[in-house]
Amino acid sequence: MSKPQDAAAGELDDMSPFGRRVKALQMLIEAELELMRSTLPIEYHATVLDIVVAPALLDIGEEAAKFTGQLEKALKVSEYGALLKLCPCIDQLTRVSSNLMQTLHLASDQHRGQIGRLVREWESKAIELLDDFEDHVKSDQLSLPIDATVHQLNADTVHFIESVEPYHDSIGQMISRRDERATASATESYVNYKQDLLGALAMNLRNKASDYKSQSTRCLFLMVRTSCNSR
């Protein structure tokens, strides 16, 4: 299993500058709007704004498509480290999205909603990675350690939780938005996900422990698991 680091995650290093680039575009458009208000009749503002923003939004769309392709690759190889690059960028885009839509209120629907659509698409990829990791924990078939020490699945799950913890609010918001009928807050949604993950881990390892022939070895294995997860 790929840990939340390296590999595909390395290809996503440029996602943070991407978010800053979108913010810079918003500031540039605001400056262009001020210039138009002082130099052009209002009936020309919408047409000129679309002409001005089209090349920049096209470039942003092409760069976003590249990242989307990398996220697809991360999903195919279960590279959960992509979350560590994706979540901060989603946070950046979410913060700027509503303001950018207001700034582009005179532009076409295609241009006005581009960043919002991108946020929803990348949130969907993040949710897929979260769900994929949970499915992996439930179905992992790695063999037991002979000496009843910490199972690799246990170590990987703890590492995963520790790695995504700084983005708990962002992840919680994505999970809560997945189900429009959900009433849980972002914090509750994240806590529920983490509890489900640890519950799946506990069940899987309890089932694995039954493969030990010695009862004392089974007890030792489960004790080590409990100790590791309670730190």
Image (cartoon, rainbow, N blue to C red):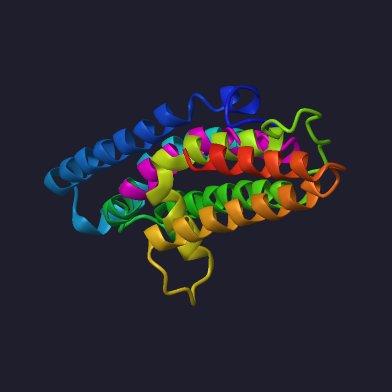
Q: Position of residue 172 (x, y in %)?
A: 44, 55
Q: Looking at the image, which is closer to me, 50 or 39? A: 50
Q: Residue at x 47, y 31 (%)?
A: 15
Q: Is residue 51 visible from the viewing direction of this image?
A: no
Is 207 placed left or right of 93 in the picture?
right
Tell me where residue 20 sits by quadrant.
Answer: top left
Which quadrant would the N terminus be assigned to in this image?
Answer: top right
Q: Is residue 109 visible from the viewing direction of this image?
A: yes
Residue 71 belongs to the span the image colors magenta: yes
Q: Residue at x 22, y 45 (%)?
A: 33
Residue 130 higher or lower than 28, as above or below: below
Is 24 placed left or right of 8 in the picture?
left
Q: Position of residue 211 (x, y in %)?
A: 86, 45
User: Start and end of the magenta stretch?
Assistant: 68-95
The residue most toward the left is: 38
The residue most toward the bottom is: 181
Q: Position of residue 178 (x, y in %)?
A: 53, 64
Residue 95 higher or lower than 175, as above or below: above
Residue 81 belongs to the span the image colors magenta: yes
Is 104 placed left or right of 8 in the picture?
left
Residue 163 higher or lower than 206, as above or below: above
Is 58 placed left or right of 69 in the picture?
left
Q: Main secondary structure of the magenta part?
A: helix
